[in-house]
């Protein structure tokens, strides 16, 4: 599991660099073309937040402190595999650009191989002998309630967006395609899973890594909005819902980090 977290962390770090730093070059360097630079940058923010979580989790000595991101990641990799298969014709598997074609084949190999491997390792890890350390510092009831509510909202909206990316995508503050809608939906469910795991763990120390991922996501998304804000219809109420959601995640991340004492 530790090895897979390091390997997966490295891959999402690279994907984040492609999408967040080089948002306008996806037709040349990424597995599939993303016409909206804001969409590419937002997905890059998600990948880099996941990289922070994966690489920090791999360094933990206790499974109880490392496992917080695994439920969300499992959902993400299976949903991304499904989205890939549904839109395989949009990938650069036979494109003229060698770099993009390589990226597409690497993407396909990763998302075909990782879901079953990660699921097998997760089950094996759960069956390993041992007990969790005691939950010495439980979360406050109001904070757990906030985590639970945000988790449910993210998973519910993400599920709806994945099923009907074009129709439900009308409630997103900028234009999405079927593929980008499903890609974003997979990340929404992943972060919803992370918040649900934080609620479940109910320990200030064990949620620490989750707060780092949340704060990374919010910070990078805000910068992406500053870079490509022209893609957003600021007259649409969805834009303010999106900003309010970011504010809620920021508050949850900051409070959780303060509560953990680190």
Image: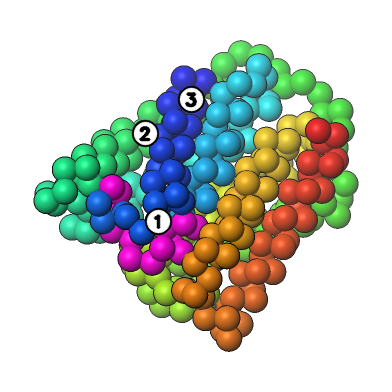
Res 85 seen here = no
- The answer to whether residue 78 is magenta is no
* Circle 3 Cα neighbour tier, 10 Å, few/some/many (<14 / 14–19 / ≥20): some
Please tell me which residue is depicted at 77% across the width and 56% down the height of the picture: 251
Q: Which mark is residue 6?
A: 3
1 and 2 marks in contact (CB < 8 Å): no
Please tell me which residue is depicted at 63% across the width and 43% down the height of the picture: 213
- N-terminal of the pair, mark 1 or mark 2, is 1
* Circle 2 Cα neighbour tier, 10 Å, few/some/many (<14 / 14–19 / ≥20): some
- Here the colouring is rainbow
Of the residues tagged 1 and 2, which is closer to the observer?
1
Please tell me which residue is depicted at 33% across the width and 40% down the height of the picture: 111
- Residue extending farthest to the bottom is 235
User: Which residue corresponds to mark 1?
Assistant: 23
| Depth order, front residue of 256/137 | 256
User: Which residue corresponds to mark 2?
Assistant: 114
Residue 205: image quadrant is: top right
- The answer to whether residue 35 is magenta is yes
Callout 2: SS: helix
| Magenta-highlighted residues | 29-42
Left or right: residue 215 versus residue 14 is right
x and y, in percent, of residue 227 in the image:
52, 63
> Label 3 vs label 1: CA separation?
25 Å
> Label 3 vs label 2: CA separation?
13 Å
């Amino acid at each position: 599991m530790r090895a897979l977290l390091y390997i997966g962390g490295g891959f999402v770090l690279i994907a984040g660099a492609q999408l967040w730093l080089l948002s306008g070059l996806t037709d040349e360097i990424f597995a599939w073309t993303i016409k909206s630079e804001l969409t590419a940058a937002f997905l890059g923010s998600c990948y880099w937040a996941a990289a922070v979580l994966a690489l920090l989790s791999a360094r933990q000595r206790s499974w109880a402190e490392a496992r917080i991101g695994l439920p969300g990641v499992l959902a993400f990799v299976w949903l991304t595999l499904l989205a890939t298969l549904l839109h395989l014709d949009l990938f650069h598997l036979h494109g003229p650009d060698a770099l993009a074609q390589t990226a597409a084949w690497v993407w396909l190999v990763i998302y075909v191989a990782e879901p079953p491997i990660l699921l097998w390792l997760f089950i094996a890890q759960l069956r390993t002998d041992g007990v969790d350390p005691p939950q010495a510092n439980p979360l406050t009831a109001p904070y757990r309630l906030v985590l639970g509510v945000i988790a449910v909202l993210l998973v519910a909206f993400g599920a709806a967006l994945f099923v009907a990316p074009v129709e439900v995508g009308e409630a997103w503050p900028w234009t999405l395609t079927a593929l980008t809608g499903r890609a974003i939906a997979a990340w929404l469910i992943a972060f919803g899973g992370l918040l649900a795991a934080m609620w479940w763990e109910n320990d200030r120390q064990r949620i620490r890594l989750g707060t780092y991922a949340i704060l990374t996501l919010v910070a990078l998304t805000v910068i992406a909005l500053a870079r490509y804000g022209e893609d957003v219809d600021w007259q649409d109420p969805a834009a303010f819902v999106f900003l309010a959601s970011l504010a809620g995640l920021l508050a949850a991340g900051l409070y959780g980090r303060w509560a953990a004492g680190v």
